[in-house]
Image: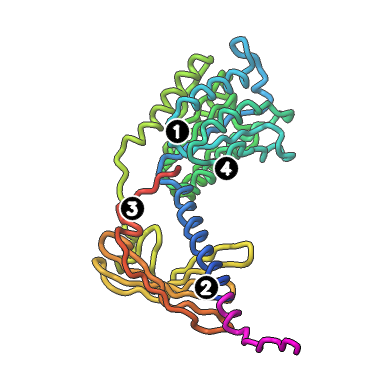
């Protein structure tokens, strides 16, 4: 007697379970990764002080100064100062005149991009800076680029320039920098140090700096003076950490307690995150209540799946969230999820992010 094959079972429940498991896992990963990038972006845009150093690397820095070249002396002193700076700073290094760009009057390079606790990278980055071949010095172009760099972070902001001479590209350099500073609309201090500059060029740099709001100019005729000037400036920047950080204010147009400045759960708000296999979008469909108590509903969509999340908010901030329905386009609503218990505050109004 031969064995008869077992009765065929419907594969649909199994497929549905697998689909739910796979898509559910993807959604969970998407939410987790989305949250990570959302908050990492806020960390990168730190409320801590930001400083960008600018070093002249045009050919004039090859001139001898105090037993070394101006470049060698400037690199060494700046490395000393950076080494002792507050490690909590968001910092970066920009140079100009190295020949990195073929167009001399646009030749500025962000050697070390802005980041928190970046001082070791800057110190190492200085080692590789050498004067370029072209006899042009786009000082203003470098300062304008630096203003745009620091404007991408939350303040206060400082730009420290060590230059061996005046801008050689644009006679309207001061006006161009002033316009860019006003356009950026950030809290900005600019410190320009003229290192061993000829008197006529020193006058030109001083006139340029005088046009820039919040800018100061110092002359450093030798290495000792350069060290002293940079030490004082760095101490002033570091002192900004001693100021008690203010709690982030509620958005000017805030209508409910869910309208948090770091995550405005406001009707119509949305965030889209790029993923290897597509995008994930968080969309706030509704938010209602007062500044003391409010609720918001959000739809999280990913590929062929979507999930509804409900947020609860109070005067303390965004208190908690729970998931409602979970749907797959080919299957419809497949699950309902409920958070039974939670504690603490998800995102406090008094929370100040510090970059790590």
Q: Which mark is residue 145?
A: 4
SS state under label 4? helix
In the image, is 258 to the left or to the right of 87? left
Q: Residues within 10 Å of mark 3 (few under 14, many from 20)?
A: some
Q: Nearer the viewer, mark 4 or mark 1?
A: 1
When the figure is inspected, residue 192 is found, relative to residue 336, above or below; the finding is: above
CA gap, disc 4 and disc 1: 24 Å
Tag 4–tag 2 contact (CB < 8 Å): no
**Which numbered disc flags the more N-terminal residue, 3 or 4?**
4
Q: Is-magenta flag for residue 84? A: no
The percent coordinates of residue 4 (x first, y second) are 71, 89
Q: Residues within 10 Å of mark 2 (few under 14, many from 20)?
A: many
Query: Residue 169: horizontal and vertical position, in percent?
Result: 65, 36
CA–CA distance in space, label 3 to label 4? 28 Å
* Residue 305 vs residue 124, the one in the foreground: 305
Look at the image and tell me in which quarter the C terminus lies.
top left
Marked residue nearer the N-terminal end (4 or 2): 4
Q: Which mark is residue 301?
A: 2
* Vertical comparison of 48 with 216: above or below: below
Which region shows up in magenta?
A: 1-18
Residue annotated with mark 1: 87
Q: What is the secondary structure assignment of the residue under circle 2?
A: strand
Which residue in the structure is indicated by mark 3?
A: 248
Q: Secondary structure at mark 3?
A: loop
Per the model, the C-alpha gap separating discs 3 and 1 is 23 Å
Which-is-in-front pick, marks 4 and 2?
2
């Amino acid at each position: 007697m031969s064995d008869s094959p077992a009765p065929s079972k419907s594969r649909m429940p199994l497929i549905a379970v697998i689909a739910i498991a796979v898509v559910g896992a993807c959604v969970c990963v998407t939410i987790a990764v989305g949250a990570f990038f959302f908050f990492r972006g806020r960390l990168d845009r730190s409320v801590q002080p930001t400083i960008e150093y600018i070093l002249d690397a045009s050919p004039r820095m090859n001139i001898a100064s105090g037993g070394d070249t101006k470049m060698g002396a400037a690199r060494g002193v700046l490395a000393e100062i950076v080494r002792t700076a507050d490690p909590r700073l968001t910092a970066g290094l920009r140079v100009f005149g190295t020949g990195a760009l073929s167009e001399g009057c646009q030749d500025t390079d962000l050697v070390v991009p802005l980041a928190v606790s970046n001082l070791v990278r800057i110190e190492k980055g200085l080692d590789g800076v050498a004067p370029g071949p072209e006899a042009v010095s786009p000082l203003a172009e470098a300062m304008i680029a630096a203003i745009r760099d620091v404007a991408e972070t939350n303040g206060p902001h400082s730009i420290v320039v060590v230059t061996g001479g005046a801008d050689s590209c644009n006679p309207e350099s001061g006006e161009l920098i002033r316009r860019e500073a006003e356009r950026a609309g950030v809290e900005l201090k600019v410190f320009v140090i003229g290192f061993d500059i000829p008197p006529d060029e020193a006058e030109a740099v001083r006139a340029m700096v005088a046009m820039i709001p919040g800018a100061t100019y110092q002359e450093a005729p030798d290495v000792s003076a350069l060290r002293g000037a940079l030490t004082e400036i760095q101490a002033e920047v570091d002192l900004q950490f001693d100021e008690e950080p203010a709690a982030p204010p509620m958005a000017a147009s805030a209508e409910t307690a869910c309208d948090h400045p770091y995550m405005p759960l406001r009707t119509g708000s949305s965030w889209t995150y790029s993923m290897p296999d597509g995008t994930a979008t968080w969309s706030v469909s509704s938010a209602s209540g007062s500044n003391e108590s409010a609720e918001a509903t959000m739809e999280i969509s990913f590929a062929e799946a979507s999930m509804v999340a409900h947020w609860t908010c109070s005067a303390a901030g965004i208190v908690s969230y729970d998931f409602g329905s979970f749907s797959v386009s080919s299957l419809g609503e497949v699950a309902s999820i409920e958070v039974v218990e939670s504690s603490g505050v998800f995102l406090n109004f008094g929370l100040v992010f510090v970059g790590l």
